[in-house]
Amino acid sequence: MGSRTRTPLLVIAVAACAGNPIGIDAGPQPEVPPDGGGFYGGPGEPVAQLRFGSFVAALGPVDFCVSPHATSTFEGPLLAGRGDEAGLGNDTLSLAGAVPGGQLDVRVVAGGSASCATPLSGADFVDLPPLLTGNGYTALLVEQAGALTLTVFPDDAPASVPAGQAAVRVISVAASGPTSVDVGQFVDGGFVPWIGGLPPLAIPQAPGFDSNGYLQLPPQTALPSLQSGGQDLLDLLPGVQLSAGAQYSLFALSPTASQAAGALFCVDDGFPSGTYAPCLLFPQPGEPATSTAL
């Protein structure tokens, strides 16, 4: 393969191919409480659905606490309260749980914490956008310029995917190495970009992408691939079937000292069913993918 040092560009593409499709296996699931595994909310209470992603390897497992804005009355840790005592590991995505609508503050604590009393350094987030009741959101914990950030993305409702279509969103959570993302499709052996230079923690603003960054595609066997500087084309998802009516998020990951950049490919729809987010993790180009239940 060619050098990875020429151009700081990460290319993620979706391509059609032949072959037997495989599903994304959610793996063993913990028992889900009768309320759907949510963090809050009784019958009829207006809530939003919120899931968390952690992409900061140096932190180790983390958990999350929430408080009505500017009250410092943090409740949680949320994942421990749902039975996930170890917390959320790096490059993983939690299931969506119910939280109160409105503006919330979020505190990040170490995984396994018994309370919300001790936040991780720089991990109180008090400027987050309000959450609308009935809507779903994904909050991504990422390091940028040496500081922790928590960015909240609105999710499309699964019912919004038109019949006979699938929807895919691409977000770069890379803090180092090639961080810009080109999104496109391989046609007749060549890369045809849909949008180029997508920066970290941004959603596309281009024709074909909706306001939350999803692109509708016909159901097909998809091959999201990574390429650095126009070289080292890597087919990451051979044989994965995009299902009609389903929606997905593809997260471009940072390289580390021991591995090149990878990707986390997750099924978005399913909230508020309480099931854990089914994802495929690609830790290093050229290595087999592993299925992970978060």
Image (tube, rainbow, N blue to C red):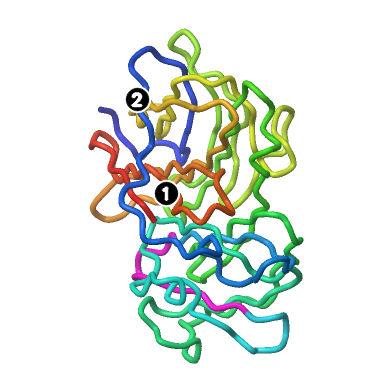
| Residue in the picture at 37% in, 27% down | 231
**Res 216 → quadrant:** top right
Horizontal relation, residue 198 to residue 252: left or right: right
Toward the bottom, the furthest residue is 117
Horizontal relation, residue 119 to residue 17: left or right: right
Q: Is residue 75 magenta?
A: no
Q: Quadrant of the N terminus?
A: top left
- Residue stretch rendered in magenta on the structure: 55-66
Q: Nearer the viewer, residue 51 or 180?
A: 51
Compute the Cα span from label 1 to label 2: 19 Å
Q: Nearer the viewer, residue 271 or 175?
A: 271
Residue located beneath label 1 in the image: 253
| Residue in the picture at 47% in, 8% down | 188
Q: Say whether residue 144 is visible.
A: no
Label 1 or label 2, whichever comes before in sequence order: 2
Q: Is residue 65 magenta?
A: yes
Residue located beneath label 2 in the image: 238
Tell me the crowding category of disc 2: few under 14, some 14 to 19, or many 20 or more residues within 10 angstroms, Cα based: many
Whole-percent x, y for residue 18 in the image: 38, 12
Residue type of the residue flagged with mark 2:
Pro
